[in-house]
Amino acid sequence: MGKFRPGRARAPLALIGSQVVGQLALVAVLPVLTRVYPPAEFGVYQFAFAIAFILLPLATLRLEYIVPTTHAAELVRRRLRLGTAVALGLSLLLIAVGVIDHLSGLTDVSGILIMTGLLVPALGLPLLDGARLVRQGARRALAVRNLVGGVAGASLQAVFALSGGDVTLLPVALLAGRLIGIAASRLVKEPATGERSMDAAARSDGSAETADPELEPARDTPYTLARALPTIGAGAMSGLTIQGLTVIAGATVGPAAAGQVGVAQRIASTPISLAGQALAQVTQLSFSRIIREQRPSLTASLGSHVRAFLALGVLIGAALAIGGPLLAGPVLGEEWAPAGVLIAMLAIPATLQVAVSPTDFLFVMLGRERRLFALQFTRAALTWTTGLVAAALTGDIGVVVLSFSIAWALAYALSLVFVFRAARTFDREHRANAAPPVTAAADASPGAATGEPASTEATASRAGVTGESRPAEPGERTVFAAMTGDYPNIGDAIIRRETLEWVHGIGPVHTYVGRAPDAWIDQIGAAPLGPVYRRRPGAQAWIRALLTTPRPVLLFEPGEVQLESRHVVRELVFLALGLAVKARRGTIVYAPRALARISAPSLWVYRMSARLADFSPMREQASFELVPGAVRSPDIAFARDAIPTGEPGPSGAARDTLVISLRGARAFPPDAWLAGVRSFAGSRGLRIVVSAQVRGDEARADELAAALDAEAFGWGSVPDLVQERRLLSLYERATVVLSDRLHVLILAASCGAIPLELVAGPSGKVRAHFAWVGVHEVSVEATGMDAVAVAAAIESAASRSPYELTAALTGARAEVRHVRARARALMSPLATGATAPTRVSSR
């Protein structure tokens, strides 16, 4: 567990290699086919292939672009079933029309129609199956399918041709080969790592499968007719461009010319045929992860892929330009020698095709289907107009191909410009979300740069409101979010940032943050959403705005709610606010909470508020049972995408660290505890790092580091957001994280580390919250343990199967997203009133 496996780094090479071998087999069979079938006869097959390729976007509805970024497993299955049904339906329709035409003798195109009908599923079904495998991260199955499908299809075509079969049998051979490849991929057993294992774990846990259909409105953009039409249209335009030469040649010059052009184009497009699907799968695997995680690194990833593909394309273009004229006659047969010159003419667009085609799908992943359609329409219009004009003016197939090639190369260059623009736009948007700026320059303070609280004098000088307010526009609602907390506290900030993501797109957000410094506002991402209110003047302004807004949404922060007797007044204020919101037909939503230090008066008032609320999720069993109408939810920190336990993080660094993070208020651990920790770390060869996720724990971290002769990972003058990223990177290097802080352990677990609370007299908080999501034995009572027992307890935790934790985290993440979807539905401008919450049984 935790060891980096070099085979993963070779996975893209395996994909490309298998695709190259599989498609090379289909190209290698060409000399057999060209010696059996003359240009006029083989041209009919090439013409049918071109028509099937143009119809391919309609056959699959371009769902192969949508499936890899679909979150909900049930939605993935529905989309794949729809695509398969459409592909088979179109195939049967074409074959039926061909058979009717043959029986009636109306025209002589029945053979083309039947071959096209057979070629549609031969081309479409592998695309849909590939999308499924990309969505699962099943690289090994993809490689097997690419290899077996290509070799089987080529072998069967050779057998049919050499046995004297009619040219109409070639599509049957290709379809059979592709189906054999798909069947072979189903027999492959993937290693239980990466996204595929996480999906499987979620299904075995059950909760993710249950929640997935509910996630569609929250995480999965519907693939509506408005999206599908431009996407399918763009695919059809691309097919018109790629197969345009064959169609133009067949329609204007004749079947023999179509045969020559078709073979030339097939050989010139050999590079994209050999590796294009695998290159697209490699980029899909990379880009879909970035888009799902909303990381602002899409442009850099796109650039590295395009540079590599372009270098490959230059080498391939040179080989085509030189080798085409020299080898066409000797390899294909002398009657096919004219195809060699045509191959050389197609070298430049073939070079750019290698670099550009694997990135076209990015427009669909980013929801820019109309832009893709416009580009593909421009590409098709430019090439077809040029080709048809050349055919009308000269009737020379060489001039037609040369003109078409020049226009095609210009269109590819234009596509490259716009795909980079789309990637940069994505990065700008999500870079802003990842590190939001302070709303106004007047709000800057020394605390914003250092993460320290601003001075009382500096804060008191402000009016209490930062940023400009705007009224909700039609189709929006105004949100009032209370996001106070313990600052600086990285866990508290992260769960509040996650909560504010619930209201993105609902409407303007007015956020009250209490006495928070600028660094806290940056960290929770409040400033870009709307005005921020601080201290007493801000609280008064926030309440005034709340009470004068029609149908407001009142959103309360997540976390642990202290219900001591002295907090009864605070709870009465919140109850009064809730009544006022309901009087204005508003909505009240709580983020996932837990109750602590409960007194009867405060609990009674809190329960009244909960009855008034539209949505009140509780994040552990005891609190769930105390609150009427509560809904089940894991802690919102579980919403983070999790790295499978023990696996390297994005940096790929080995797990060589034992991290310790303890509360400063807790008694210092005894010598036996310290000795046991040192013994375990020494036996595993781990370095010990003592960190603080809450600034108040820094002094304790320094004490522990000195006692253990370990590294202290302090805060110092580092800004809070930077410290957050540093800590998450540290957890990604950890094998085990020892802490008595709940969010230290949840965040560490999401980073792939084993979480363990091993202290004297644990509070039960960690045990309760992890048990709520199905993870047990996280909290261990250390009272009275000697050094050997301490080391054994840590070793026992570190040696547990990683899949249990990975499965639980995946299920918890899906459950939180389900809760988020329900909350957003209630806060939506379309919500007409309160919906009685459904009380869900615990596990």
Image (spheres, grey):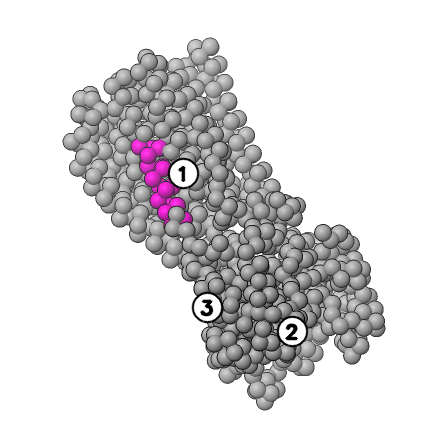
Residue that numbered label 3 is attached to: 687
Q: Position of residue 228 (x, y in %)?
A: 51, 41
Magenta region includes residue 9: yes
- Frontmost residue, 775 versus 336: 775
Q: Quadrant of residue 668?
A: bottom right
Looking at the rendered structure, the secondary structure element under dot 2 is loop
Residue that numbered label 2 is attached to: 484
**Any mark on residue 739, and which?**
none
Q: Earlier in the sequence, mark 1 or mark 2?
A: 1
Looking at the rendered structure, the secondary structure element under dot 1 is helix
Q: Position of residue 753 (x, y in %)?
A: 53, 60
Q: Residue type at mark 1?
A: Ala
Residue at screen point 51% across, 27% down: 88
Q: Position of residue 779 (x, y in %)?
A: 64, 63
Dots 3, 2 in contact, CB < 8 A: no
Residue at screen point 27% across, 41% down: 349
User: Is the magenta region chiefly helix, strand or loop?
Assistant: helix
Q: Residue type at mark 2?
A: Thr
Q: Residue type at mark 3?
A: Arg
Residue at screen point 50% across, 61% down: 735
Please state the extent of the stretch shown in magenta in the rendering: 8-24
Residue that numbered label 1 is attached to: 143
Residue 202 seen in the current view: yes
Q: Local crowd at mark 1 within 10 Å, few (<14), some, or many (≥20)?
A: many
Please tell me whether mark 1 or mark 2 is closer to you in this view.
1
Q: Earlier in the sequence, mark 1 or mark 3?
A: 1
Q: CA distance from mark 1 to mark 2?
A: 51 Å
Looking at the rendered structure, the secondary structure element under dot 3 is strand
Magenta region includes residue 689: no
Q: CA distance from mark 3 to mark 2?
A: 36 Å
Q: Position of residue 661 (x, y in %)?
A: 56, 71
Residue at screen point 71% across, 74% down: 543
